Image (tube, helix red, strand yellow):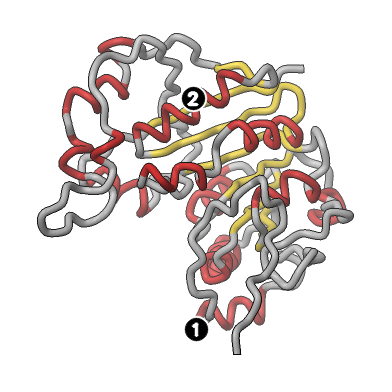
Amino acid sequence: MSTQPEPQPFPSQPVSFVRRGSRLQGRRRDAWAELSEGLVVDVPRSSQADTSVDPGWEYEAVASFGRDAPLVVEVGSGLGEAVAHAAAADPDRNFLALEVYKPGLAQTLLRIDQGGLSNVRIAQVNAAEALATMIRPASVAELWVFFPDPWHKTRHHKRRLVKDSFIDLAGRVLKPGGILRLATDWSDYAAQMREAANASPLFENLHDGERAGSESPLTQVWASGVEHEVGGTPRREGREPAGTASAQEGEDALGGWAPRFEGRILTSFENKAHDVGRTIFDLTYRRVS
C-alpha cells in the first residue's frame, strides 16, 4: 500500500537538514526519559512532523527559564558542545538550542546535567518555523548558526539554510543591536552567507572591509586549491571530489570576515575540518534599529 508524503510546512523555506535516525539508545535514551522535564521545550506541532511548530504558539522565554535574561539562540546545536560550553562560561545569559536530531538533543541533555547548567533549554524544531513564529520578535540578543549543512552539490544549493529568506527571519527575532554570528568551512557557502547578509538593510557587518585582498581567507583558499583536493565527500573512482565545481580563483576584494568567535569552543566537527585542511570562515553582523 502506498502512502502519501507528509505535507511540508513553510514550502518556500526548504527544510535545510538531512533527516537522520532519531532512535535513542543507552545513555541518551535514559537522559531523554530522566532529564527532559523542564529542559526540553514542549512545542505544539502543526503537523505529524516531530520538528513542526504550531504557528499560533509563541515561546515564553522568561517563564521557561524562570528569569529575564539576555537570550542566545543556537540554530543547529548538534551534540550540544558549543551551547553547553557557552552556557557554563556565561551564566548570566539564557541559551536556547534548536535542533532536529533527537540523539543530538539527548546528548545535549547529558552535557547540561554533567555541567549542572540551569540556563539552557532545548527544542526539537525546524529552525525556519521557529524563527518565523515560535520566537517572539526582537527578543533575541544573539543568534548563532555554526557549520550548517553545506549542501555542497551545486544542484542542492537551494536547500541551504543561510540565504535571503533566513536573514529576514534572523532580523525578525533579533533585538536592535543584536548579534548574528555565522560560521562555515565551505568557501562558496561563506560567500553566499556574506552576500545575503550584506544585502539586507536589517544588518551591518561589524568587520566591513576587513581581511580583504591577500589577507582574505577566501583569497587564500582559492590560491591554495585545497577545495579541489579535499572537496566535501570521499572521492569516487574516476571522479573529482564533490565541491570542486564551486572552487574559484582570484582575489576577494570585499573582505568583511570576522576573527574566530572566541565564545565558540573548538568542537569535534571544527577539529575535523582543520585536520583535512579546510578554512573556517566567520561572519558577525549587528541588527540595526
Q: Quadrant of the N terminus?
A: bottom right
Q: Quadrant of the C terminus?
A: top right
Q: Nearer the viewer, mark 1 or mark 2?
A: 2
Residue 109 in the figure: left or right of residue 79: right
Residue 271 in the figure: left or right of residue 109: left
Residue 26 vertical placement versus 195 (above, below): below
Residue that mark 1 sits on: 25
Q: Using the image as rendered, state which of residue 283 and residue 19 is in the foreground.
A: 19
Secondary structure of the residue carrying numbered label 2: helix
The amino acid at mark 1 is: Gln
Residue 256, image x and y in percent? 45, 16
Q: Residue at x 11, y 59 (%)?
A: 237
Q: CA distance from mark 1 to mark 2?
A: 39 Å
Residue 180, image x and y in percent? 60, 31
Q: Using the image as rendered, state which of residue 168 and residue 119 is in the foreground.
A: 168
Residue 212, image x and y in percent? 35, 11
Residue furthest out toward the bottom = 1
Residue 89 vertical placement versus 80 (above, below): above
Q: Using the image as rendered, state which of residue 2 and residue 63 is in the foreground.
A: 2
Q: Residue at x 66, y 80 (%)?
A: 34
Residue 234, image x and y in percent? 21, 57
Residue 252 vertical placement versus 164 (above, below): above
Secondary structure of the residue carrying numbered label 1: loop
Give the numbered dot on residue 194.
2
Dot 2 alpha-carbon crowd within 10 angstroms: few under 14, some 14 to 19, many 20 or more: many
Q: Are the residues at dot 1 and dot 2 in contact (C-beta closer than 8 Å)?
A: no
